[in-house]
Image (cartoon, helix red, strand yellow):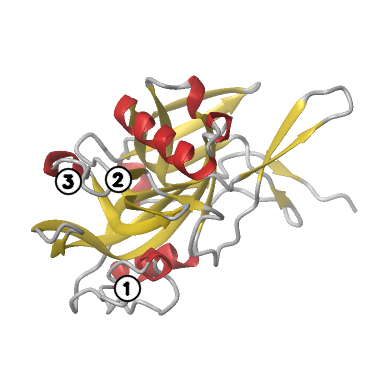
Amino acid sequence: MSEKTTRTVYGMYLQTCAHLNIPFVMAPNTTLNELLSIQAGVIPDANVYPTLGYLSFGNGGLTADISADGTLVMMPKIYKADSASLYNPIPLILRAIGDDITPDRRAKYAGRRVESRNGVSYIAYYLKRIDKSQIKAGMFLTTVVNGVKNTVPFVPDSSVLHPVAPVISNPGVITADGTYISASAPLNVVLDALDTEELLNVFDIIYANPNAAIISEMAICSGLDKSITITDPGGSQFTMNEAIAVQVNDLVNIGAPLQFNADGVTFSIDIGATEPLFSSTVATASS
C-alpha cells in the first residue's frame, strides 16, 4: 500500500525553533520517553536541538473489514497533528532475560527497558536508529502531463533572482497546472531479515499468532543520544547510548505482513516539503 504521512505539531515546533535559532522547550506529555518510562523528563542541554534520528513501529494504523463479496478491505486510520505516539506502539525486539542482543547490534536500537509480557520479564527495544549515511537532500521539479509524472533535479538559474509575477485575470481563480517544486531527502527505511525475525518473535510472544504479525504504522522521531549506564537483571553493568527527548515528528500509515516478508521489508519516505508552481494555468471565474 502507499504510505500516508501526517506531520505533528511537535516536529513543526522543533523546526521553527531551529530555523529561528531560538530556545527549544520540550513540553511535558509529548515524548515517547514519558510513554515508555525510559529516561522520562530528561531534557536536552540548552541551545541543543533534537534531530530526526529514530523510528517507532506499531500495529494500530489500519482497520480491516470484509466486503459483501468476501474481499478483504484495509483502510488507514487518520492521525491528528497533536498525536504524540502511534495508536499501538510495539517493541522491535523482545529478548529473554540473559539473552540480550550484542553491543554491536544494540548500537542500531534505543528505547530499551525491561517489561513483563504474560507474566514473563523481557528486555524490550522500541526504537530503531535511522541510518543517515546514505540520505542525500536535493531540490526537484516535478511535472504531471496526462497523468504521467516526471521528476528532474531543479537547478536555479539567474531568473529566480528576478522573479516575475504570474499573470492572473481579475477576477480569476489560480489553479495548479501539475507542476511542483520540492526540497526532498528520500529516506529508505529497511527492516532486514534479522529485524523481521525479531519482530516475528515479538508478535509470537504478545499474540501467539503469526498471522497477527502486521506492521501498520511508523513514527519518524526526533531526539538525542545520551550515554547511560545500565544495570542488567543479573547485576552486571554496561553503557549504551539511549535516546532522550524523543518526539514524534511524522506519523506514517504502512502495511507489512511480516509472515510473507521473512527476508525483510523496505519503505521509502520523503523527508522534505513540496509546493505547487502556479506557472501558467489560470481559470477565469464565471460571472
Instruction: Name the front one of labels 2 and 3.
Output: 2
Instruction: Give the image quarter of residue 119.
Output: bottom left
Q: Which mark is residue 107?
A: 3
Q: Which mark is residue 96?
A: 2
Q: Quadrant of the N terminus?
A: top right
Q: From mark 1 to mark 3, how far is it between C-alphas?
A: 20 Å
* Residue at 19% from the left image edge and 38% from the top image edge: 133
* Neighbourhood count class around disc 1 (C-alpha, 10 Å): few under 14, some 14–19, many 20 upward: some
Residue 50: x and y in percent read 27, 64
Dot 2 or dot 3, earlier in sequence: 2
96 or 107, which lies in front?
Answer: 96
Q: Is residue 256 left or right of residue 27?
A: right
Dot 1 or dot 3, earlier in sequence: 1
Amino acid type shown at disc 3? Ala
Q: Which residue is mark 1?
A: 40
Residue 99: x and y in percent read 22, 42
- Is residue 5 visible from the viewing direction of this image? yes
* Residue at 83% from the left image edge and 23% from the top image edge: 70
Amino acid type shown at disc 2? Ala
Residue 211: x and y in percent read 58, 29
* Residue at 15% from the left image edge and 62% from the top image edge: 230
